Amino acid sequence: MAGSTHTVTNQTPPLTGYDVFTSDRVLTEAVERHLTAAPPEEALAELSGLGRSCGSLQTQEWGVQADDHPPVLRTHDRYGHRVDEVDFHPAWHRLLGKGVSAGLTDAWSRPGGHVRRAAAFLMWTQVDAGNCCPLSMTHAAVPALRADPELAAEWEPRLTSRVYDRELRPAHLKAGVLFGMGMTEKQGGSDVRANTTSARPLAEDGAYELTGHKWFCSAPMSDGFLVLARAPGGLTCFLVPRVLTDGTRNVFLIQRLKDKLGNRSNASAEVEFAGTWARRVGAEGRGVATVLGMVAATRLDCVLGSAGLMRQAVAQAVHHCAYREAFGGKLVDKPLMRNVLADLALESEAATTLGLRLAAACDAAGEGDERERALLRLAVPAAKYWVTKRCAPVVVEAAECLGGNGYVEESGLPRLVRESPLNSIWEGAGNVQALDVLRALGREPAALDAYLTEVGAARGADHRLDAAIRDLLTDLADLAAAEGRARLLAERLALVLQGALLVRYAPPEVADAFCASRLGGDGGAAFGTLPPTLDLAAVVERARPVV
């Protein structure tokens, strides 16, 4: 009798039915470390509840469904009326509703709110990064609107609401709203000062009529948008409601949806303003200054989003290798594979630790801590530059750990690979971040002082970190004609800060491996080239998700 050809052995069980929060030791330790203003039990229980949802089969299926069924633009209804609506798969609305109810648009109303939200955002990215875009924009709109206290009083309660209302109707009739933004134009891109969209003042105080075209408009189905346009007094920030107070649709012409590499579940659009009603936010000519708070918040979300993608990729790789056998043993126990996994785990831990530290700085800055505010000014663009750039190589290497299985859509790794470059490009690509680092160094001495105080807290604990700090000080001593090496400065600022945080807070084996490979030069350019004398088994075990 012929033997069966369909006996399945040596396949890894799916990574599902687990708590994404409690199984991530780095994340739980960071939350406990930074939630010092109040007992963290409530926050830990809340995050664990979200973590179980993130790890559930149902929620994971929603993420796949939303990505498999991208949004569809409907410019007209059946009768020929212009409607400019975007249709989404039901899974998208389930995810977005869950994200809103979990507080991902509300970091502003409670102590430790930024740390709690950052941990939640990092986890939720692992389910579907696409729906994190409107959640991020809505969260980030709050500091921009605070430039106009009257507008903030009207809109902030809706933005921070935990109610998801998908209907397009006047905002004052809704318990919760979402925001998008439209800054860039096709002729300028990141150079928003080249914008040509015009704003003509109307008779009503603070009201304008916009005419122009936005090359990228995030989350075009939102209830409101923050946009930049050129008023008589210069480049100015405006709030564009999707539906006017009388119930009529504002002129918001969606020309097309972008066909993107990843981020498939989310709609990114080109939109046209043609007599579009808008309300000024802040003073005329102060548009860039008004949106800086929003930009800082979204850039931090790029760091957290990349940290989340890295964590999920590393968790999948370690989980696979803990079950898969080859050449007489578990892959995770093979010295070379262990080296690769440990190297990936270091990158993931450094990203998470830095992201949560910056979230804690946001909480402290909100309480009036000027040193923490100054630290954010330099550390956020440096972290955004470096962490987002590390995401793609980490995710690709993690996929390789699964071999051919990692190249198959069902594994989930290809979706992570497609998503991995996004955060480096959005909210200012690498050169923009590096130049912003130079700007902070040149114009805000308090930012460098705060940074040096932060990394100085770890001096004397590791000779490689101490040497890296000395080298960095040498680099910073002469910033004349520094633009050509701005990327190198941003990279070193981020690496030294990550090393200092890991020396202070991570287990010795993690800090030792990071400082040896990232600061001491004891390793190669590819992952899996750590010194074999390090305690790599402990590093890998720390990164293993507990199912």
Image (cartoon, rainbow, N blue to C red):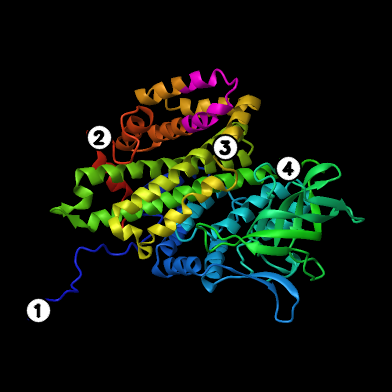
Q: Amino acid at mark 3?
A: Asn
User: In the rendered image, which residue does mark 2 sit on?
Assistant: 534
Per the model, the C-alpha gap separating discs 2 and 4 is 52 Å
Sequence-wise, the earlier of marks 2 and 4 is 4
What segment is highlighted magenta in the picture?
472-493
Sequence-wise, the earlier of marks 1 and 3 is 1
Estimate the x, y position of residue 547 in percent, counting from the top left: 31, 60
Sequence-wise, the earlier of marks 1 and 4 is 1
Q: Residue at x 33, y 58 (%)?
A: 406
Q: Quadrant of residue 462?
A: top left
In the picture shown, does residue 351 fall above or below 266?
above
As drawn, the residue found furthest toward the left would be 1
Cβ–Cβ under 8 Å for marks 2 and 3 = no
User: In the rendered image, which residue does mark 4 sit on?
Assistant: 194
As drawn, the residue found furthest toward the front would be 187
- Mark 3 Cα shell of 10 Å, populated few (<14), some (14-19), many (≥20): some
User: In the rendered image, which residue does mark 1 sit on?
Assistant: 2
Per the model, the C-alpha gap separating discs 2 and 3 is 35 Å
Q: Secondary structure at mark 2?
A: loop
Is 501 on the left-hand or right-hand side of 522?
A: right
**Residue 439: assigned label:** none
Is 130 on the left-hand or right-hand side of 252?
A: left
- Mark 1 Cα shell of 10 Å, populated few (<14), some (14-19), many (≥20): few
Q: Secondary structure at mark 1?
A: loop
The quadrant of the image that shows the N terminus is: bottom left
Per the model, the C-alpha gap separating discs 1 and 3 is 63 Å
Sequence-wise, the earlier of marks 4 and 3 is 4
